[in-house]
Structure formats: structure tokens, C-alpha cells
């Protein structure tokens, strides 16, 4: 996770140009975030990862080719460790029950993507992943 004062490197992955633009716009409005890249597919995201080294990946659930779950699994298999957030227009109960097993840290409804929500989500993820020595 980013050190204090450093901006969080974010990669947005969505096969819809409109959704990619809207999520990217929300990311750029979060002071502590830096949008380092966007990808139109899981395959493109996997190719970009070593180049842009994101700390947070906002990943669409439904995409042509590799979907969000398979892309998440492959990101983890290749040894990358960004926080993975699945973004979906489906409600949480309509998603497969095994979402967390592929390395996804959180699920976010596309309708809830806003600068405020992204900032709160990142804060929550940092608290959950902070080493025990730092939580005291």
C-alpha cells in the first residue's frame, strides 16, 4: 500500500468506453489517487500491470473474453498484489458466491462509484491490510 503522501496508482478495467470514462473521472477526482491507465479488457489489463504497477484495480465483472473473476485469478497467479475491486451493475446477491476466492478485496456497485465512495473504500482496504504492528 502507498506510503503517506504518495498517490495511489489506479488501473480501471471495463469493456464499456462510457463506464471506463465515468469510473476514470471519479478516480481523478480523488486527491490521493492517480489514474495510471485504463484497459478495455482483462487481457489488456494483464499486459499493462507490469508497466503501470497499480496498487488498486477497479475491474468490471462482465467483459468479453476474460471476465473480471478470471482476470482477478490471473493477476494473483502472476504474482501481482494490487487491491482488486470488482465493479458490477449486478447486485451483490446476483454475483457468484465464490467472488472472494479469486482475490477480490471488495465488490462495488457501478451505481455507487463516486469520488467519496472510492476514497472511503480505499481507506477501508488500507485498514484491513495494514500490518498488525501498525494498527495499535
Image: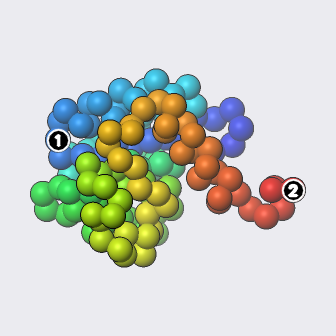
Colouring scheme applied when the structure was drawn: rainbow
Return the mark for residue 53.
none
Find out whether the residues at labels 2 and 1 contact each other: C-beta distance under 8 Å. Answer: no
Return the mark for residue 136.
2
Task: Count neighbours of disc 1 (C-alpha within 10 A) and say few if under 14, some if 14 to 19, many if 20 or more.
Answer: some
Where 59 falls versus 105 (above or below)? above
Q: Which of marks 2 and 1 is nearer the N terminus?
A: 1
Q: Residue at x 49, y 37 (%)?
A: 117
Can residue 125 be seen here? yes
Q: Is mark 2 on a helix, strand or loop?
A: loop
**Quadrant assignment, res 20:** top left
* Residue lying at the far left of the rendered structure: 64
Q: Which residue is drawn at 34% across and 32% down?
A: 24
Residue 135, percent from left and from top: 80, 56
Q: What element carries label 1?
A: loop
Distance from the alpha carbon under mark 2 to that under mark 1:
42 Å
Q: Which residue is drawn at 30% across and 71% down?
A: 96
Where 108 falls versus 129 (above or below)? above
Q: Name the residue under label 1.
A: 16
Q: Which residue is drawn at 29% across and 51% down?
A: 88
Residue 107, percent from left and from top: 41, 56
Residue 30, percent from left and from top: 51, 28
Q: Is residue 94 left or right of residue 72?
A: left
**Quadrant assignment, res 25:** top left
Where 73 falls versus 8 (above or below)? below
Residue 106, percent from left and from top: 46, 57
Can residue 50 be seen here? no
From the viewer's side, name the closer residue of 3 and 96. Answer: 96
Amino acid at each position: 500500500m502507498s506510503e503517506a503522501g504518495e498517490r495511489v496508482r489506479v488501473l480501471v478495467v471495463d469493456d464499456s468506453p462510457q463506464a471506463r470514462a465515468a469510473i476514470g473521472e471519479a478516480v481523478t477526482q480523488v486527491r490521493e489517487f492517480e489514474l495510471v491507465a485504463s484497459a478495455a479488457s482483462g487481457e489488456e489489463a494483464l499486459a499493462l500491470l507490469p508497466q503501470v504497477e497499480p496498487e488498486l484495480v477497479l475491474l468490471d465483472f462482465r467483459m468479453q473474453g476474460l471476465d473480471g473473476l478470471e482476470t482477478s485469478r490471473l493477476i494473483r497467479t502472476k504474482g501481482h498484489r494490487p487491491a482488486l475491486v470488482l465493479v458490477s451493475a449486478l447486485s451483490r446477491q446476483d454475483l457468484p458466491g465464490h467472488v472472494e476466492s479469486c482475490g477480490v478485496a471488495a465488490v462495488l456497485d457501478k451505481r455507487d462509484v463516486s469520488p467519496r465512495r472510492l476514497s472511503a473504500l480505499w481507506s477501508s482496504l488500507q485498514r484491513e491490510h495494514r500490518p498488525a504492528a501498525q494498527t495499535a
